[in-house]
Image: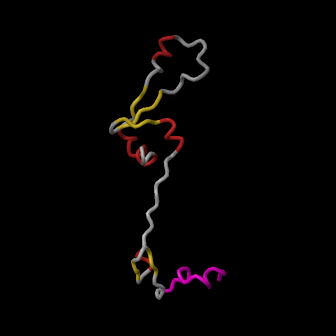
């Protein structure tokens, strides 16, 4: 038995404790709910941008190691790509506030 459970009736699980939150009286402590916020995945936030109802990203393969590549193949790697429709559910979960 920990030291905190002796002094805190919330941790002991007793139902006779009446909690007060902003003037409201709750007879049962389990009725108080806490809303947790979702976290933004920072690696995804650096790579994807929101556009209307989808996302866009840069095309990989243009940063370094391109000596000897033809201009035609490098030009194909420029620009932006939109997200695949099958991946949108994952992106919305990783970027909840974008």
Question: In this rendering, is residue 47 above or below 76?
Answer: below
Residue in view at x 49 percent, y 15 percent: 73
The magenta segment is 1-14
Between 33 and 76, the residue placed more toward the observer is 33
Query: Residue drawn at (61%, 20%), measured in percent from left and top?
Result: 65
Relative to 12, say whether 81 is above or below.
Answer: above
Does residue 17 show up magenta in the picture? no
Q: Position of residue 20 (x, y in %)?
A: 45, 79
Residue 32 at what x, y percent from top left? 42, 73
Where in the figure is residue 2, as x and y percent of width and height? 65, 80
How many numbered markers are drawn?
Answer: 0
Magenta stretch: helix, strand or loop mostly = helix
State the quadrant of the C terminus.
Answer: top left
Work out whether residue 15 or residue 80 is closer to the camera in this orientation and state it. Answer: 15
Q: Looking at the picture, how far across and down is residue 68, in whole percent?
A: 59, 12
Q: Residue furthest bottom?
A: 16
In the rendered image, the quadrant that contains the N terminus is bottom right
- Residue sitting at 48 percent across and 85 percent down? 17
Whether residue 11 is in magenta: the answer is yes
In the rendered image of this protein, does residue 67 appear above or below residue 36?
above
* Rendered image coloring scheme: secondary structure
Decide which of 51, 18 is in the foreground and name it. Answer: 18
Task: Looking at this view, name the residue that lies furthest to the front.
Answer: 23
């Amino acid at each position: 038995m920990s030291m905190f459970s002796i002094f805190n009736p919330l941790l002991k699980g007793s139902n006779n404790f009446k909690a007060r939150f902003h003037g409201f009286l709750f007879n049962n402590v389990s009725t108080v709910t806490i809303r947790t916020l979702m976290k933004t995945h920072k690696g995804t936030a650096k790579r994807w941008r929101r556009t209307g109802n989808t996302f866009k990203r840069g095309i990989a393969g243009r940063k370094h190691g391109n000596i000897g590549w033809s201009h035609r193949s490098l030009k194909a790697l420029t620009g932006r790509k939109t997200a695949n429709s099958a991946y949108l559910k994952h992106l919305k979960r990783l970027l909840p506030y974008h």
